Amino acid sequence: MSDKELTPGRHLIYMEWYSRDVGGLFMKMNRHLFAAKSPYQRIDIFESDFYGRVFSLDGITMTTERDEFMYHEMLVHVPMFMHPNPKKVLVIGGGDGGSVREVLKHPTVEKVVMCEIDELVVKAAKEYLHYTANKLDDPRVELVFEDGSKFVKQFKNEFDVIIIDSTDPTAGQGGHLFTLEFYKACSEALKEDGVFCAQTEGIFYDYEWGATAYRRIKANFPIAKMYLGFMPTYPGGMWSYTFASKAGLDPVKDFNPEKVRNFKEPLRYYNEEVHVAAFALPTFVRKLIED
Amino acid sequence: MSDKELTPGRHLIYMEWYSRDVGGLFMKMNRHLFAAKSPYQRIDIFESDFYGRVFSLDGITMTTERDEFMYHEMLVHVPMFMHPNPKKVLVIGGGDGGSVREVLKHPTVEKVVMCEIDELVVKAAKEYLHYTANKLDDPRVELVFEDGSKFVKQFKNEFDVIIIDSTDPTAGQGGHLFTLEFYKACSEALKEDGVFCAQTEGIFYDYEWGATAYRRIKANFPIAKMYLGFMPTYPGGMWSYTFASKAGLDPVKDFNPEKVRNFKEPLRYYNEEVHVAAFALPTFVRKLIED
Amino acid sequence: MSDKELTPGRHLIYMEWYSRDVGGLFMKMNRHLFAAKSPYQRIDIFESDFYGRVFSLDGITMTTERDEFMYHEMLVHVPMFMHPNPKKVLVIGGGDGGSVREVLKHPTVEKVVMCEIDELVVKAAKEYLHYTANKLDDPRVELVFEDGSKFVKQFKNEFDVIIIDSTDPTAGQGGHLFTLEFYKACSEALKEDGVFCAQTEGIFYDYEWGATAYRRIKANFPIAKMYLGFMPTYPGGMWSYTFASKAGLDPVKDFNPEKVRNFKEPLRYYNEEVHVAAFALPTFVRKLIED
Amino acid sequence: MSDKELTPGRHLIYMEWYSRDVGGLFMKMNRHLFAAKSPYQRIDIFESDFYGRVFSLDGITMTTERDEFMYHEMLVHVPMFMHPNPKKVLVIGGGDGGSVREVLKHPTVEKVVMCEIDELVVKAAKEYLHYTANKLDDPRVELVFEDGSKFVKQFKNEFDVIIIDSTDPTAGQGGHLFTLEFYKACSEALKEDGVFCAQTEGIFYDYEWGATAYRRIKANFPIAKMYLGFMPTYPGGMWSYTFASKAGLDPVKDFNPEKVRNFKEPLRYYNEEVHVAAFALPTFVRKLIED
């Protein structure tokens, strides 16, 4: 039976409880396609008419087919377009494959190393999440199943772009990817003109984590700037990312919109105006992260 | 992975909404083992630590592994022990197999015909609900996949016991099994000393249906008596059944407790005291069904 | 505006989570009439079309206007009809007033002492729960706001009937009313022909508490018998009570149904047949509490 | 008792179901402060630790104390700062008072007419929502309780700024404020240099309404531009507004950031960078509204 034939009742409800259990998002599901417990976390994949397939770790939504493009485009294209010639890219986390899919839209890329701690996430994504995982078998991709916070330490001056596509600091092993030490190792693993970008959590519910991550990144790079994007199925729909550059590139002043306008691959969220606009922070966010 | 290794989070919630949407029961699930849409209804099977496997039709709980014994024992053993020598039994509905399982505990039984409209329910039960379906392949069992309200019309003076194990009158094709005409056909299909029993819905939320079914049964038999049993995962936990006898047997006065005391098969709910006690109706139930 | 004019949406949901968070009951509410935190517990009163007014302590349903009669009649009339001439009655707990209301239906009663630890419960009940609290100002009633487990110790050979209408052992101070020591004190506070009855929790979800309470009561009286009643809005709808008698009265053999048949006050659940039937325990309950 | 002393349990849940019932947001509440049915809609006010006071109409969240500033600042300050000298302002809807509060931060304002169809909303807001309603008694404010779609028709060339702070087109009488005819009347009620702004719904769940409202506004003004803002407790957290100008002012090219930088009143979301950035639409939104 095709997925679309099974219309949802009101009896199968996926509830994501936000931090400190203040509330959350619920989605009416059609079916539960996959459930497993890896050594790191509980993995679930659901399906619904509106959200499409929904992937969650420890009950926290990682991607939905309907809006993952907003997250992955904002996490990946901001740093990728800031680098003059990205050839070698490291993605830490990102087991669903969405970040790798976006990285490979850039024709200069020769190699993407994706270091995901949980091999079962990648297996599940390959089977159930074709919308994100469809480039994981590309010959330019090298998959490594290790703790990214350890893996990155073996590299010095190696990557053009490093992208941190982590789970929440409070879920699974996500906390490892939010430490000062980890960000320092990332900086060292980058080439001199390398750029870095990390998802730095929501700004409405988990604002302390966003501010903390931003400050720790900033402590390791000559320039670091937070930017925001809409992400409807993440808590508050208001997501933060932090861009950093080893050579001090400013993501607004040094941005070349022409590169984006000439880009051949289809994008649904990111464009040259959104790139700049994302760095315009609401006043309360400015204050949250100001020194 | 065995089922028990996947502990439930709080993110997968099965919600049964009761009649008129006044509220309902929710259960925290581990996984959703099966979902399909048959020509008649949506079928789901879930799994949880506490309730075990849970089977639902159109979002209404049919059985949970934890308490189905209460329902099936009360539906089946009351009529079976009232018949002096039950050899040929008809079960209408009951696709999960629980009623057949209980019928076959009676050593006099030579044949059970189970007429279930939805073949997919039986397939799913055989695969996922071993706790109820484990006797469906017994050589004494004949499975028929037809509308029970039509099927029963072809028989006259044929069965010793007829048991109606229907879904709710408002779900799928359940309404067919709650008509005056259907109960009349059941009466005709019974031998002269035959006995009849039907589940007649909850008495707290769906009390009108219980009273209606009782009156319609009573109109077709010289004696009909409603009885009650606990059934925690059904609405209100307060379930009604109606016993009827073609020869006028009274389920209390003509009951022989010795037969129950000498019964060799294990039972977990029904016993000779419960049989009699079940017919003692609370005053508001007496009034609900009084003429 | 009268209460009935405000029809419920689907946005105000009362969720009772059952023990160990396995699931629970949800009710669609119209309004939230009262919320307060006493020194002992959080008190809420809601209103809904179907359930009427709903009173909860620490998120656990105590009474709903729709089904409280089932609980209060079974808790009170079983012991009251067993006593030959109940004049002086002690109710411990029961702050909503429902038990007192039932006790006062017996014309022999000269005095009811109700010892409720939480005065705020009684205040709220008097204002919002007229359906249970309507007899709390009767001149035969003496209200005491103390810990019942301490209060009862001052009496020896004083009461004809003691009724324990406690909250759950896990909520507020409910645990005090489930100890061996407490039941011993109750026995001592009874006259020689006194009878005792306690609600002893649900048998489907909280079965360990039921068995424990039963055994502790039994250890303090020459005879103690558990009985069951339907209670749709309590967990599983399957509620246990334990009757005990200081003089060894058997609640079935020594029961006089004539007294019930001649009773003038209106009852909606309890009757002479239900009294006897309630002591017929399903086999799994027999086993749960057997020695 | 102060509101903060009553910590929330898990038993009082406010659930907003999004369009087409695909899912929604739930919030754990402390208490339900107010519930009433006006001739137009059901009005509820809840209170929670995290969200503060929450105001909803027909089960749809209108404001929460925690994030209403994001919505009201974006709806009001974009048009107010675009007008060279706003003296007379019309707010249609906005019964909670939040838009009026923001309008009055502009010192040039001499009069604000607020036309809200539902007087009971304003009464409730004055009593329970001081965070938004605290300027409704300002002498510059004139409150009118009428259908805004009719009220606006009596004015020609009257207002400097018109702000549409409506409920959803599907709730209450909200649909009246989304018609071509209504937007035409607004245009006529503006002075020649007047500016207009309307909330035009979410872009993730209710995207058709956003596009429709935008096109209808555009059909009545020489220039109309949609912009976006974060609004965590609205569906998807991604909210659209449409700015229009009778004289053809472009909200980006003709914007003077200096006015914002010199503004003396405290703002928490809106600033001169956010003003411009909000008009940078993600590609899928551009496509949704393109001609």
Image (cartoon, coloured by chain):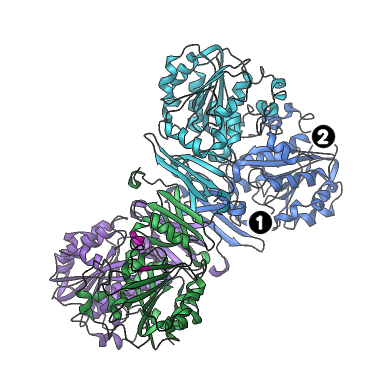
Chain colours: A blue, B purple, C green, D cyan
| Residue indicated by mark 1 | A171
Tell me if mark 2 has few (under 14), some (14-19) or many (20+) residues whose alpha carbon lies within 10 angstroms of its own: many
| Residue indicated by mark 2 | A249
Q: Position of residue B139 (x, y in %)?
A: 32, 77
Residue drawn at x 66%, y 31% as measured from the top left: D267
The amino acid marked with disc number 1 is: Ala
Within the image, what quadrant is residue A39 found in? bottom right
Residue drawn at x 34%, y 87% as measured from the top left: B264
Camera-nearest residue between C205 and B111:
C205
Q: Position of residue C7 (x, y in %)?
A: 36, 45
Residue B43 visible (yes or no)? no
Tell me if mark 1 has few (under 14), some (14-19) or many (20+) residues whose alpha carbon lies within 10 angstroms of its own: some
Judged left or right of residue D134, residue A211 is right
- Residue C204 numbered tag: none
Judged left or right of residue C30, residue D113 is right
Camera-nearest residue between C16 and C101:
C101
Chain of the residue under the numbered disc 1 shown in the image? A
Camera-side mark, 1 or 2: 1
Callouts 1 and 2 on one subunit: yes
Please tell me whether mark 1 sits on a helix, a strand or a loop.
loop
Q: Position of residue B124 (x, y in %)?
A: 41, 64
Q: First in sequence, mark 1 or 2: give its number.
A: 1
Residue D46 visible (yes or no)? yes
Please tell me whether mark 2 sits on a helix, a strand or a loop.
loop
Residue D286 higher or lower than A205, as above or below: above
Chain of the residue under the numbered disc 2 shown in the image? A
Q: What span is in magenta?
A: C131-141
What distance separates the C-alpha of mark 1 from that of mark 2? 32 Å
Q: Main secondary structure of the magenta part?
A: loop
